[in-house]
Amino acid sequence: MDSGLAIYVLRRILQIPPLLLGISLLAFLIFYLSPVDPVVAYLGLTTVQKMPPEDVVKVEEQLGLDKPAHERYLLWLENIVQGDWGFSYIKKRPVLDVILERFPATLLLTLTGYSLSMVLGVIMGLASAKREGSPLDRSLLRLNYILYSTPTFLVALLAMLVFAVWLGWLPSSRMISVDEPVTFWACSLDRIRHIILPATVLAISHLAVFYTYIRSSLLEAMRDDYIITARTKGLDERAILYRHALRNSLLPFVTQIGLAIPFLIGGSVVVESIFAWPGIGKLTYDAALRADYMLLMGMTLFTSILVIIGNLMADVAYAILDPRVKYN
Amino acid sequence: MESIRNSCSGLIVLGMLALVATMAPLISTHDPVKASLAEPDQAPSLNHLFGTDYLGRDLFSRVLYGTRVSMLVGISAAALTVFLGLLIGLTAGYFGGFVDSALMRLVDVIYSPPETILLMVLVTIFERNIWSIILAIAFTHWMSTARLVRSETLSIRQRPFVESAISLGAKDSYIIFRHIMPNLLYIVVVSVTLMTAHAILTESFLSFLGLGIPPHLPSWGNMLNEAQRDIMKGIWWTTIFPGTMIVITVLSINLLGDELKTRLAPNREVRTEL
């Protein structure tokens, strides 16, 4: 690694702590400035109205609401540094424990969906780029446009209706069956059957972005000088497309992985809520429904960290892969 | 040619939707909120064109009224988003210095959490009504417009006609409104159009999760939220009709927005930013 790159990476890493501090302040301020009374959000309006006032004060003290804003913020930061990230009301456990416990399920679902999306995107992109403007290319473009305008939850509902209810091929919710099979093979098959629908829906939700990217970068590569050289050497079109153009368009594509993180998290909220997949997307949804502030603040910070790491990786990967990039 | 044909059909569909939204009381065949417990879960028929939901409400009328909610939320949220982005981007780009770096750090901070997470956090803290949804959408989306407006303002500021205006002693407000704003108009037009489509998707997503428009209002997202329970019974019409309306609406706005983008954006870099 040359020193220019090292300095660039170091400078990018040094920018992260102030950014994280900013995000934590944002998350805290949103809840602090909220017009909704946290006690009401926590216990429900009818319960609070029936409670004697001194009990309400007691709950406020328990939630730390009696302290001034800066003390509450510092207390939260202290919790973060100590590694428990505050206390989740709905789970009755430390926030970070809950998030880390649910994270592997999301990781499994997202990675499966993302890989599937990438494979589909490359296949469709190649089919399109083989002949620009062909009927196949034009119908793929149209399909892509419709996909781009379709909300993920609609795809999920339709997939569930067709494959789980009408055809009955696949289970419609959860990660494993209620009566989980005992043998290893039956158990693995059960898990695979459960992941197919949510992963495919997640893949479809991200397909439009991938396909557009692959198609345009393939078409751009096909106009480059080295392709013309390959043609004049008499290479056949297949070899040119697969060996020269595809390889060069996939390289910058690798950097897209880091940038896709926010969309994948967004998609996982929808997909996990619909298919009752026990990941962090479902967790956020449950927290939002029951106004679990600590958990929501923790999720904001946690997902921001993932996004920041993704952006950093994308930039560094790009800088390493493309020697023309200037570090500034 | 094809793109022109596409954007024209987009425009026609949008015109029809606007007509449907304004004339909803005249076109609808039933009261959209009146439950009729005698006829729940009816399949589409001549009496109920799109069938009925689990409370026996007429889906056709509900879908028509849903157009109003989606259009209102989509257009207001888009306008507010772009207004915020324009205001902040202009301030940062024109005045530069400390103001600029402070505002751009703010953009970095709000950009960091995934949009969906920030949206869910925001709707939790507000009381649920149409305006809080619009505010939440605007708060989570103004940053990209702000960045683009800022960089465009920076480059316009350095052009000779602005420099000569400054040297002639023109006031800031004069330069901003006479020289800079007109050159940013295309960003406003394209962003508002594309943002409307995105805001409609966002609203339907939030309502679908039960975190958006209050449940008594017939919005497409709310209808799909209720349709979830029907899926398991194999009832398709409560999902298909509101779902198709979302896709058609968003698709035609996107077609229009993309055509505007190719026509109005001066170069490729700006086009990918928009």
Image (cartoon, rainbow, N blue to C red):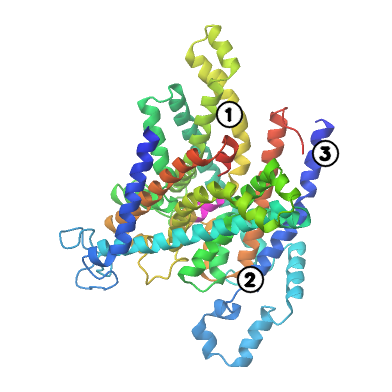
Residue behind mark 1: A250
Mark 2 surroundings within 10 Å by alpha-carbon count, few (fewer than 14), some (14 through 19), many (20 or more): many
The spot of residue A138 in percent (x, y) is: 38, 30
Q: Which mark is residue A31?
A: 2
Q: Which residues are magenta?
A: A265-269
- Relative vertical location of residue A215 with respect to residue B95 in this rendering, above or below: above
Q: Is residue A308 magenta?
A: no
Residue behind mark 3: A7
Residue A147 picture quarter:
top left
| Dot 2: chain letter | A
Judged from this view, the residue extending furthest toward the right is A3
The reply to whether label 1 and label 3 mark residues of one chain is yes
Asked whether, in this view, residue A29 is left or right of residue B132, the answer is: right
Please name the amino acid that badge 2 sits on.
Answer: Phe
Please name the amino acid that badge 3 sits on.
Answer: Ile
The spot of residue B174 in percent (x, y) is: 66, 56
Residue A1 picture quarter:
top right
Q: Is residue A268 magenta?
A: yes
Marks 1/3: CA distance?
27 Å
Marks 3/2: CA distance?
38 Å
Main secondary-structure element of the magenta-colored stretch? helix
